[in-house]
Amino acid sequence: MEKQEQEKLSYIPRPEQWILGTVTLLAGFLYAKMLFGDSFGTVLFTHWPWEALLAAFTAVFIAAGIFYGQKMGKRVDWSSNIYLFFTAAAGIWTALWGGDSRQDICPYVVLFLHGAGVYWVLALSGNRLDGRMDERGLVDLLRGLILLPFGYFGRWFIALANFLRGILALKTRHSRAAWQAAAGILLSIPVACIVVPLLMGADETFNRIVTETAGSLFIWIGSLWNGQRVMVWGVALLVCCYLFGLFYGAFETAEKEAPRRLSLPPAMLAAFLAMFLILYGLFFLIKLTEIPQALGEIRTGELLRSTYAREGFFELCWIASINFVIFALVNWYWPEGSGEKKGVKTKKVCLTVLGIQTLAFIFLALFRMGFYIAGFGLTFKRVFTTWFMIVLLVTFLLMTAGNWRKLDAVRLSVLFGCVTFLMLAYSNIPAWTAG
């Protein structure tokens, strides 16, 4: 806090922030150009497709992170490099196939790119709640996407004011020479206004070049002030402030005390889990008697294969996803010192049962999807949904195993999901599916 107040009260040279501010302004320009297309007219990057602009934005974003991280004394380690690789791989994919209308996975790659980039900044700066990917990784991501950028949204203007104060505070001989040179240029303008028309009258070619250049310059300056371009430049500045806030908030607030782990009473958490375990147990008792009957109706033609495969599929996916949140929250908020025999063992047993039940939900959903694919073939949506269910399956296998032995289940499942997602994206799905 004292450091921030000191920056506001007195001039402190911050060249790394000035450079970061310039780079994030360029990144904001690229992002706004991507959103609004050719609304910039002839101002740089004209007619660049959105995918090229997003790839260029990614490159500038990575360069800004590496530069600022080095200036802040952050060592690049393998943990942050993993997320840097994911960010770069998503950016490269966008540049290669983002413009292909057949690539239905493109919106998901763009979302993946944004999430991976933000999480890379948090990993590089060491600004994660627990210093690693665990059950609170999603909270870290939300901090990086919302809290840090908007919490330090105005820091770009403070850095700009600091830079301008630095220029005004310079009293060296070189600065005096620069001001003297600027004054000389200003004094030359009235004389130039007399000389240039004389030169134009002396040579027709010179007259034509000056006239065309001046006309184009005035048209361009005038075009910058129309309502559409003002809006686009405004968006560029907003993105710039967002990115600067992200970098500043991540690196400047990384040094903090270790967070105190909150906990809830074991009896409360056990009762909370028991309600779901009983509910899911009743569901499976009913479901086991229904499956043979449904398959028989499909063979006799009384029930359509597509109807059976779609019925309840997405509900099963949602239940599995909700169970992941329940599993992670209970695992995090269960007290660590509640006794191995009573507290911790109860947690392990309950979470293991929940994991097994969730695996059963996932197998049931995969069975329905496989049943549907066998009859109607592969499409992007069917492939993507199957991938999602496989990631959930692996996640719950790891989390259930992590109950009984030391295992970074969440980190391993996130890495598995990211790697397989990129493999799926780079596999060129339209080439091996029906549509």
Image: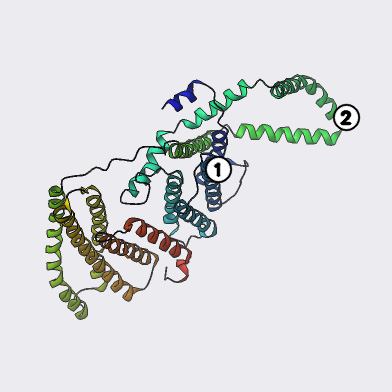
Taking the spot 69% from the left edge, 23% from the top edge, the residue there is 175
- The part of the image, by quadrant, that contains residue 67 is top right
In this orientation, does residue 306 appear?
Answer: no
Taking the spot 47% from the left edge, 23% from the top edge, the residue there is 6
**55 or 44, which is in the foreground?**
55
Residue occupied by mark 2: 202
Q: Look at label 1 and name its amino acid.
A: Phe
Mark 1 crowdedness (10 Å alpha carbons): few <14, some 14-19, many ≥20? some
Secondary structure found at label 2: helix
Taking the spot 62% from the left edge, 24% from the top edge, the residue there is 167
Q: Quadrant of the C terminus?
A: bottom left
**Picture coordinates of residue 56 (x, y %)?**
56, 49
Mark 2 crowdedness (10 Å alpha carbons): few <14, some 14-19, many ≥20? few
> Horizontally, is 238 left or right of 190 in the view?
left
**Picture coordinates of residue 400 (x, y %)?**
25, 61
**431 or 392, which is in the foreground?**
392
In this orientation, does residue 432 appear?
Answer: yes
> Horizontally, is 385 left or right of 279 in the view?
right
Q: Quadrant of the N terminus?
A: top left
Residue occupied by mark 1: 67
Which of pointers 2 and 1 lies earlier in the amino acid sequence? 1
- The part of the image, by quadrant, that contains residue 352 is bottom left
